[in-house]
Image (tube, helix red, strand yellow):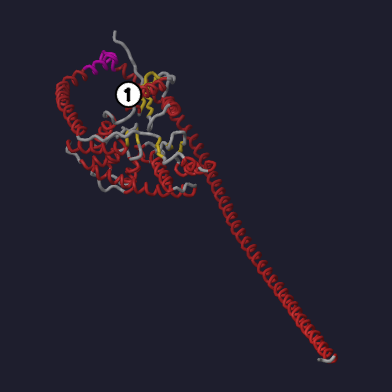
């Protein structure tokens, strides 16, 4: 049995051990706390340093951005200042030019005034001399009448009678023989040549329209074509220049436009967009540009095929391209490219019958309406535009004259020009070639004549050349030479304002004086 002392010593030892252990643990925990505090303090210091570094970097970035924006602003400001300076310079040059023009006009007016004064002086001098000459002629006539014992009127009448009788005797038989020969041969040969040419050539008729119908896979796609608040349809119409009509017609939309070439681009582009499925303004512009490039290549192929079909070679690439564009141009419902090919065939066949240059005739016939490819975008008639194109691309003088003369704007200087003019009339007037009805054609000519007759001083009017020209006969005692020019301008302006017609209409005012007397 252990003694009380032993037990007490053991308990004391255990108590001391516990106290020592607790002290050691307390010291260990204290060291750990101190270490954690130092670590947190170090982390805090490092975080403050890092934050300061980041702050400095951001400040530097802001300063760099500010400097960059400042430089960009200075560049833009310098560009604007330069543009303003250029504009001021141009305005100064324009003012100087206007000042010079004003001075030139003043000098011209002074010169005109001087010329008018000189002209008035010369006119007075001329009147005086005419009076003197008239007096001398009167005296000479009186002396001749005394010598010949005949009055002046009797002498003139006798001389006229003698000359007319002699001319009749010398030319009557010759004129009669020439007329008989011409009547027997000319009409027969001309009809044979034209009939043979028509029988061997006839191009199909193509109807002119102003709309194209595009079939849709379903009606749901109409909403995608329109787009949110109509942005897709506006972008499409802006890019193509063609109006889209979306109505209640199931699974169809209508493309409306007077330019068949632009309408074809719009049709192909819309079909591509529906097949692709992505319909938005950016994609629309991309597809339209791509289709326009493809159409440029296609019209070159169409022009080359037309040249190959007709047998015309060596045309300039730009003329071939313009021929391709004629495939999308119509006149009175007749496709202009097919009409040009038909005129080329007819001209070549008639030239072969008359032993002329058939290749040159076909070339002139194919190019006679080339101006219609760009006449909607260029000032002037299609004949004047065509002549300019032929000159620009160095076509033969015969081709140039054929283009200028096929509507009688200029005189035909070569037989081929006459053949092209005849072939053009044949192609346009043969049955089925053009869509305009006889009733509409007659009404248009009547309207043209009535409009010209409505002006004061007009006695008669005649619409000729299928309505391409109106000839106005005026009363000479009511309209003078200066008034004739003004009347022509007024009639042309009224026709342009009140009538719809293809091409242009020439207004020709004719004023003549007729002296009439009766022999009793």
Q: Residue at x 35, y 21 (%)?
A: 136
**What is the magenta segment's predominant secondary structure?**
helix
The answer to whether residue 15 is magenta is: no
Question: Which residue extends farthest front?
Answer: 1
Boundaries of the magenta span: 144-161
Q: Quadrant of the C terminus?
A: top left
Residue pictured at 60% horizontal, 55% vertical: 81
Q: In the visual, does 409 lie left or right of 5?
A: left
Say which of 281 and 105 sits in front: 281
* Left or right position of 334 against 236: left
Residue 125 seen anywhere in this rendered image of the structure: no
Vertical side of 161 occupied by 39: above or below: below
State the residue in front, 192 or 119.
Answer: 192
Mark 1, residue position:
438
Q: Kindly give the residue lying farthest to the top in the view shown.
A: 520
Q: Picture coordinates of residue 347 (x, y %)? A: 23, 37
Q: For mark 1, does the 10 Å Cα neighbourhood hold few (<14), some (14 to 19), or many (20 or more) residues?
A: few
Residue at the (32%, 19%) spot, across then down: 140
**Location of residue 433 in the rendering, given as x and y in whole percent from the top left corner:** 29, 31
Lateral position of residue 168 relative to residue 150, left or right: left
Position in image of residue 431 (x %, y %): 27, 28
Most foreground residue, 61 or 307: 61
Q: Is residue 150 magenta?
A: yes
Image quadrant containing the N terminus: bottom right
Q: Position of residue 420 (x, y in %)?
A: 26, 36
Q: Quadrant of residue 152?
A: top left
């Amino acid at each position: 049995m252990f003694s009380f002392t032993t037990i007490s010593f053991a308990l004391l030892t255990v108590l001391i051990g516990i106290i020592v252990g607790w002290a050691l643990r307390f010291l260990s925990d204290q060291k750990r706390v101190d270490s954690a505090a130092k670590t947190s303090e170090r982390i805090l210091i490092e975080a403050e340093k890092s934050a300061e570094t980041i702050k400095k970097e951001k400040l530097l970035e802001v300063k760099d951005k500010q400097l960059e924006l400042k430089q960009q602003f200075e560049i833009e400001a310098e560009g604007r200042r330069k543009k303003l300076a250029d504009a001021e310079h141009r305005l100064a040059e324009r003012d100087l030019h206007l000042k010079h023009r004003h001075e030139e006009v003043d000098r011209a007016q002074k010169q005109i005034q001087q010329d008018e004064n000189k002209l008035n002086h010369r006119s007075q001098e001329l009147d005086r001399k005419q009076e003197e000459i008239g007096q001398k002629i009167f005296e000479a006539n009186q002396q001749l009448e005394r010598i010949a014992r005949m009055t002046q009127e009797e002498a003139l009448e006798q001389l006229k009678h003698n000359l007319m009788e002699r001319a009749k005797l010398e030319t009557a038989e010759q004129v009669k023989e020439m007329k008989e020969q011409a009547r027997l041969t000319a009409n027969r040969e001309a009809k044979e040549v034209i009939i043979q040419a028509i029988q061997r050539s006839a191009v199909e008729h193509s109807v002119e329209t102003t709309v194209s119908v595009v079939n849709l896979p379903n009606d749901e796609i109409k909403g995608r074509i329109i787009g949110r608040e109509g942005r897709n349809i506006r972008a499409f119409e802006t890019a193509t220049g063609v109006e889209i009509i979306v109505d209640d017609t199931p699974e169809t939309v209508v493309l409306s436009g007077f330019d068949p070439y632009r309408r074809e681009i719009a049709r192909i582009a819309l079909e591509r967009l529906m097949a692709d499925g992505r319909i938005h303004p950016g994609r629309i512009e991309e597809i339209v540009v791509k289709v326009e490039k493809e159409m440029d290549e296609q019209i070159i192929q169409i022009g080359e095929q037309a040249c190959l079909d007709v047998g015309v070679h060596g045309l300039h690439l730009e003329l071939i391209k313009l021929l391709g564009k004629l495939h999308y141009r119509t006149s009175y419902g007749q496709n202009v490219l097919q009409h040009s090919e038909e005129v080329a065939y007819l001209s070549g066949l008639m030239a072969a019958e008359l032993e002329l240059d058939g290749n040159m005739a076909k070339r002139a016939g194919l190019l006679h309406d080339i101006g219609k490819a760009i006449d909607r975008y260029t000032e002037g008639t299609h004949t004047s535009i065509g002549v300019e194109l032929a000159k620009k691309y160095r076509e033969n003088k015969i081709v140039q004259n054929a283009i200028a003369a096929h509507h009688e704007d200029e005189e035909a200087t070569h037989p081929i020009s006459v053949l092209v003019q005849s072939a053009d009339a044949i192609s346009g007037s043969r049955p089925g070639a053009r869509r305009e009805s006889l009733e509409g054609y007659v009404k248009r000519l009547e309207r043209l004549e009535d409009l010209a007759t409505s002006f004061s001083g007009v006695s008669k009017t005649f619409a000729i050349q299928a309505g391409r020209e109106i000839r106005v006969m005026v009363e000479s005692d009511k309209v003078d030479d200066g008034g004739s020019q003004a009347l022509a301008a007024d009639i042309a302006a009224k026709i342009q304002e009140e009538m719809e017609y293809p091409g242009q209409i020439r207004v020709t005012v004719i004023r003549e004086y007729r002296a009439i007397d009766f022999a009793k």
